[in-house]
Amino acid sequence: MRWWDIPAVLVLEHELFPEDAWSEGMFWSELAHARGPRASRRYVVAETEDGRLAGYAGLAAAGGLGDVQTIAAARDQWGTGLGARLLTDLLQHATAFECAEVLLEVRVDNTRAQKLYERFGFAPIGFRRGYYQPGNVDALVMRLELAADPAGPPPIPAADPAPPALPAVSGTDDSARSGTENHG
């Protein structure tokens, strides 16, 4: 994700998370930490072949701990495997950031996202009461322990079969361009 992606990201953000959408300033703040030799964030976007935003995701890392900040996919992308691809990208970067574990919060009523995280090996570890405001919705906290051996993290599950035109994943390092509904 780059600064010029923010307007389209905000439109999707407000569509998917009308009660607790991030502000433009929050995205700018996250992107400020996503580039350069001291980067501690990874933000990616997914675009369709015609250039329309399909989804985005973000990870923060510090002190051996990764935190999935957000994952979102346009509703017409649900069930295509895009969320799995975005999460795969974040977990690969968590390994690059030398994270021993990755945490995330997900709405207790978002079973679609919870199932995705469980497929990747995330396990519930607790709740944050009233985490999502102003709706006062609880968050389920989940954790994935990454392998500490040189062989790397646990294998990432294969994404569901995807249609031929699955959006590509691209991050802040310009390596490429690519949601499930999660927001934390």
Image: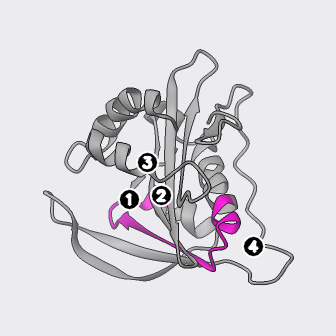
Q: Is residue 1 left or right of residue 105?
A: right
Q: Report x, y in % for residue 105.
A: 39, 68
Look at mark 4 in the image and give the residue it sits on: 153
Measured in 3D between alpha carbons, the distance from the residue under mark 3 to the one under mark 4, in whole angstroms, is: 27 Å
Up the image or down, 168 lies above or below 33; here it is above
107 is within the stretch colored magenta: yes
Q: Secondary structure at mark 1?
A: loop
Q: CA distance from mark 1 to mark 2?
A: 6 Å
Residue 18 placement, left or right of 50: left
- Is residue 123 among the parts visible in the rendering? yes
Q: Are discs 2 and 3 less than 8 Å apart at CB?
A: no
**Which residue is drawn at the image coordinates 60% and 42% (left, top)?**
171
Q: Are marks 1 and 4 in contact (CB under 8 Å)?
A: no
Residue type (three-letter) at the residue carrying disc 4: Pro
From mark 3 to mark 1, how far is it between C-alphas? 29 Å
Magenta residues, start to end? 93-113
Dot 3: element: helix
Of badges 2 and 4, nearer the viewer stands 4
**Residue 9: percent from the left, percent from the top?**
40, 34
Vertical arrangement, residue 62 with respect to residue 44, above or below: below
> SS class of the residue under badge 4?
loop
Inspect this view and state whether residue 181 appears.
Answer: no
Q: Is residue 26 magenta?
A: no
- State which tag comes first along the sequence, 2 or 3: 3
Q: Which residue is mark 2?
A: 113
Q: Residue at x 26, y 46 (%)?
A: 21
The crowd level at tag 2 (other Cα within 10 Å; few <14, some 14-19, many 20+) is many
Residues at marks 2 and 3, CA–CA distance in whole angstroms: 27 Å
Please identify, in this view, whether the residue under mark 2 or under mark 3 is nearer the observer: 3
